[in-house]
Each structure stands twice: as structure tokens, then as C-alpha cells.
């Protein structure tokens, strides 16, 4: 990991609130010795008041300060965060060639990769402050492809491996979409998928193929594409390879906020339909009126609504234009 990434990631690690616990966690997954990382607020997450948990699956250079920092950010949202060590402690991770070898050995062997993720969930569920009915996972790069795999195989669709029924959703950040998929399984429940994709990272063909595969197994999914010129590693603070891997602060912020909202839907609020307002019974604090105006030489009739207690000539408000659908305003 580049020095800039280390510095940016490390900035999150000491910034712990009063009761935040962070610790390295040894465990075994698929017969391999691993070293994970857990972060949570011990004042909120107890055996009597269990918290939802989010698994963090590493990018291709191994579980390190980047995943630890993201775990601390998730703990700040009120979750138990567990950064999984997919490669294992004895796998070389010092060089680019090491990363290629380790990621390729998992990307080309779905049984190995899924077994490592399953083993991490097994360890996570040993903690009595974790709510086993409210689980999610996020993955970056290599880990993002793993999230797509989880959506494809579902809870019981991979031979010999089951994932917790409480795994409600997974989020993929700049995950490779060209290869490394497990075979889609149709006869199983599955987590919802939120996928964040750079417009210049994943080809339109790969997005189309993924969409078709998800549709074929009736997966619930959302795909967000970001542009212009958003390439790989847009959430990696130190990524600075023009045209290949570049941090994008707006996309990082937008994708993170979207994922936090996704977790709220999964764990707390659910998906609520937007209620249609009753225009004939508008609350008294609103002003509404039809507005005559001319546009392009044509007489038009618009509609405006606002709160006069908030929006005045001395306290101006932002404004949003609503453009009609095909049957008119």
C-alpha cells in the first residue's frame, strides 16, 4: 500500500470514540490461519443490546489499514465491523506480484474464495453482541467481486457452503466484473446487491452481462454508475494512477452515503413507498399557487409550492424544478 494510503487510512484508526473497541482477531477459515480486525462501540453493542454487523472484504493487496479504517467508519455508524483476512497470515503480500498471485488463486477458485468468506462469518457470529439476523457485507476491488458472487450464489446456492440467512445485503465498490463469478443459483434466497461502478472502470458489456445474470436469478439489485472518467479504485484515498486507478472524493462520498442508507433500509427502516400527498389538503404552513408564464413564445401554467416561513427575500431557499412526464403537468 502506498504511503499516502497508509497515512489517510491511519487517520481514522486513532479517532475512536469513548467506548469504541478495535482489535486484531485470529481465526481459521477454510483450514487457513487468518488475522481479522473488529471494531465496535462497546457501550452500544452488548449481549443484551446486540448490534447489526457488517463484514468488510479486502481489496487485492490484502487486509490492511484501508479495511481497518473502513471498519472504524462502520463502527461509527453503530455497527459491529469485521474486516476479513481472505488470503491468510502466511500468504505473501509484500509486492505487486504477490497480490496478483493471491487474488488470482481465489478469483479462479470460487470454492476457495467462498470458503474464506464463510469462515469469516463463522468467526463474526461467535460474538454475543452481534445480531445474527442483521448482517451485511461490503467489498472493495477483489472483495467487490466477492460481493457479486454472494449475490449470485445466495445463502444456499454454492455446493457445500452456506451463508447466514441473516445476511441481508452486500455492497460492491469497484469490483472486477469481467470474470471471477461463481455460477448463479436460482433455487435459494439471496442478499440484496448494491453495486458502485466507475463509468470508465467497467465496460457497458460487463454491466449488461451482470444485469442479465442478476435478472435470471431474480436478484434484488441496484447499480450506480459514476462519471465522467471515473476509473478503478475511486474510494482508495491514495490511488493516483491517471486513467487507471484514481481516488475521486465526490464518488467516494456519494457511494459511502448511499451504502449507509442501504444499511438503514436493511436493518431498520425497510423500504417505504413514497406517499402521494393530498394536494387538496396541503398543510397551512405551505403556500401553493398556479403560475402563468411564457416559454419559447408559448403560454404555460406552472405550479409552485414553498414554506413562506422558511423562504423569503432575505432568506432565500434552494429550488428544484420538476419536469412533467409525457401526459402533461
Image (tube, rainbow, N blue to C red):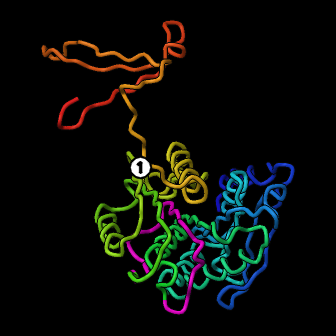
Q: Quadrant of the N terminus?
A: bottom right
Could you tell whether 266 is left or right of 91 in the image?
left
Q: Quadrant of the C terminus?
A: top left
Could you tell whether 230 is left or right of 106 in the image?
left
Which residue is pictured at 50% across the width and 47% down the height? 251
Mark 1 — residue?
226
Which stretch did the figure color magenta? 159-184
Q: Quadrant of residue 117?
A: bottom right
Q: Nearer the viewer, residue 86 or 280?
A: 280
Which residue is pictured at 74% across the width and 49% down the height? 11
Q: Quadrant of residue 222?
A: bottom left
Which residue is pictured at 64% across the width and 58% down the height? 2
Q: Position of residue 164 (x, y in %)?
A: 60, 78
Could you tell whether 272 is left or right of 216 in the image?
right
The residue furthest right is 18
Q: Nearer the viewer, residue 140 or 8?
A: 140
Q: Position of residue 114 (x, y in %)?
A: 55, 82
Amino acid at each position: 500500500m502506498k504511503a499516502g494510503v497508509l497515512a489517510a487510512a491511519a487517520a481514522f484508526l486513532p479517532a475512536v470514540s469513548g467506548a469504541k473497541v478495535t482489535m486484531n482477531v485470529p481465526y481459521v477459515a477454510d483450514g487457513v490461519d487468518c488475522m481479522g480486525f473488529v471494531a465496535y462501540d462497546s457501550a452500544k453493542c452488548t449481549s443484551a443490546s446486540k448490534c447489526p454487523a457488517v463484514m468488510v472484504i479486502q481489496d487485492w493487496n490484502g487486509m490492511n489499514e484501508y479495511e481497518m479504517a473502513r471498519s472504524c467508519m462502520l463502527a461509527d455508524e453503530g455497527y459491529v465491523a469485521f474486516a476479513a483476512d481472505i488470503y491468510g497470515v502466511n500468504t505473501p503480500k509484500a509486492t505487486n506480484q504477490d497480490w496478483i498471485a493471491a487474488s488470482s488463486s481465489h478469483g479462479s477458485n470460487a470454492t476457495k474464495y467462498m470458503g474464506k468468506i464463510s469462515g469469516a462469518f463463522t468467526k463474526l457470529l461467535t460474538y454475543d453482541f452481534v445480531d445474527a439476523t442483521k448482517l451485511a457485507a461490503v467489498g472493495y476491488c477483489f472483495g467487490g467481486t466477492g460481493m457479486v458472487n454472494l449475490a449470485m450464489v445466495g445463502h444456499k446456492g454454492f455446493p457445500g457452503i452456506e451463508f447466514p440467512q441473516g445476511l441481508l445485503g452486500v455492497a460492491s465498490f469497484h469490483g472486477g466484473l469481467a470474470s471471477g463469478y461463481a455460477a448463479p443459483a436460482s433455487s435459494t434466497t439471496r442478499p440484496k446487491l448494491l453495486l458502485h461502478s466507475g463509468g470508465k472502470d467497467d465496460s457497458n458489456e460487463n454491466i449488461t452481462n451482470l444485469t442479465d445474470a442478476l435478472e435470471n436469478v431474480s436478484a434484488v439489485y441496484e447499480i450506480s454508475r459514476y462519471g465522467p472518467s471515473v476509473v478503478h479504485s475511486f474510494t482508495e484515498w491514495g490511488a493516483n494512477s491517471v486513467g487507471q486507478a484514481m481516488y475521486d472524493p465526490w464518488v467516494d462520498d456519494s457511494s459511502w452515503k448511499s451504502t449507509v442508507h442501504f444499511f438503514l433500509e436493511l436493518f431498520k427502516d425497510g423500504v417505504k413507498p413514497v406517499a402521494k400527498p393530498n394536494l387538496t389538503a396541503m398543510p397551512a404552513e405551505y403556500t401553493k399557487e398556479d403560475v402563468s408564464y411564457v416559454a419559447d413564445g408559448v403560454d404555460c401554467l406552472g405550479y409552485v409550492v414553498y414554506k413562506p416561513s422558511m423562504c423569503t427575500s432575505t432568506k432565500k431557499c434552494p429550488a428544484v424544478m420538476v419536469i412533467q412526464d409525457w401526459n402533461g403537468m
